[in-house]
Amino acid sequence: MKTRQCTCGTSVSHEMTGREALEREACPSCGKDVLFSSFIRMDVAMSEYCNLTCQMCRRPSEAIFMDKEICKRGLTEAREVGVETISFSGGEPFVHPAIYEILDYHTEKSYPAMSDAMGHFRDGLAKYRKSDFAGARALFGRVLAINPDDKAAQLYVGRCDQLTESPPPEDWGGVWVMEHK
Ligand code: SF4
């Protein structure tokens, strides 16, 4: 049994066997469908088209891409039902004309005040590239105050701490050298 909250505020429960891809339960108060899934991972095939030509591949020659609005709706629903990991595949997903728009897609619910957070992140990045690690860390911290799950801000807070402890040379160009995977 899984319980989720309808947008009207009512708790809605649904019997689960553990293998459901997507099921609907009508809210007893407002009648709206509430979605349930047992899945925590989802793969989105953006297109079967690919810009490479591996001989063994059955890729189509015609470039047909998933409609971006359908894809965004799927992402929203996946987040709502508790999918934790989403991967994008193809063909080659990066030949999709709207791939960056789709990867950046959030709603006010999935990332509240995202434009404020992006402003802090952009300013933080500018300070980071000028080696102002304390100033950058403060701005990345503001991003995390808005969304503690923001992975990019978490990453840069860690880098700021490391670079404060072991400062780079004066002619540092802002490039982070990976020393391990
Ligand atoms: S989809 Fe994969 S196997 Fe097929 S052509 Fe592209 S890279 Fe090669």
Image (cartoon, helix red, strand yellow):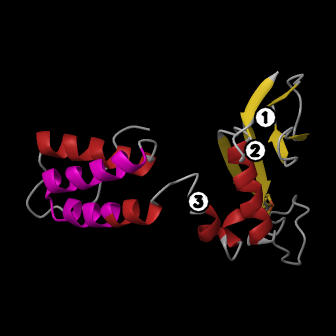
Look at the numbered discs 3 and 1 and tell me whether their residues touch, using CB distance below 8 Å: no
- Quadrant of the frame with the C terminus: top left
Query: In the image, what residue occupies the spot 81% across and 66% down?
Result: 47
**Mark 2: which amino acid?**
Met
Query: In the image, what residue occupies the spot 22% across and 47% down?
Result: 160
Residue 69 in the image: x percent, y percent? 76, 70
**Residue 161 showing in the rendered view:** yes
Give the secondary structure at mark 1.
Answer: loop
Give the secondary structure at mark 3.
Answer: loop
**Mark 1: which amino acid?**
Phe
**Label 3: how many Cα within 10 Å (few below 14, some 14–19, many 20+):** some
> How far, Cα to Cα, is label 2 from label 3?
17 Å
Numbered label attached to residue 106: 3
Look at the numbered discs 2 and 1 and tell me whether their residues touch, using CB distance below 8 Å: yes
Identify residue for label 1: 39
Numbered label attached to residue 42: 2
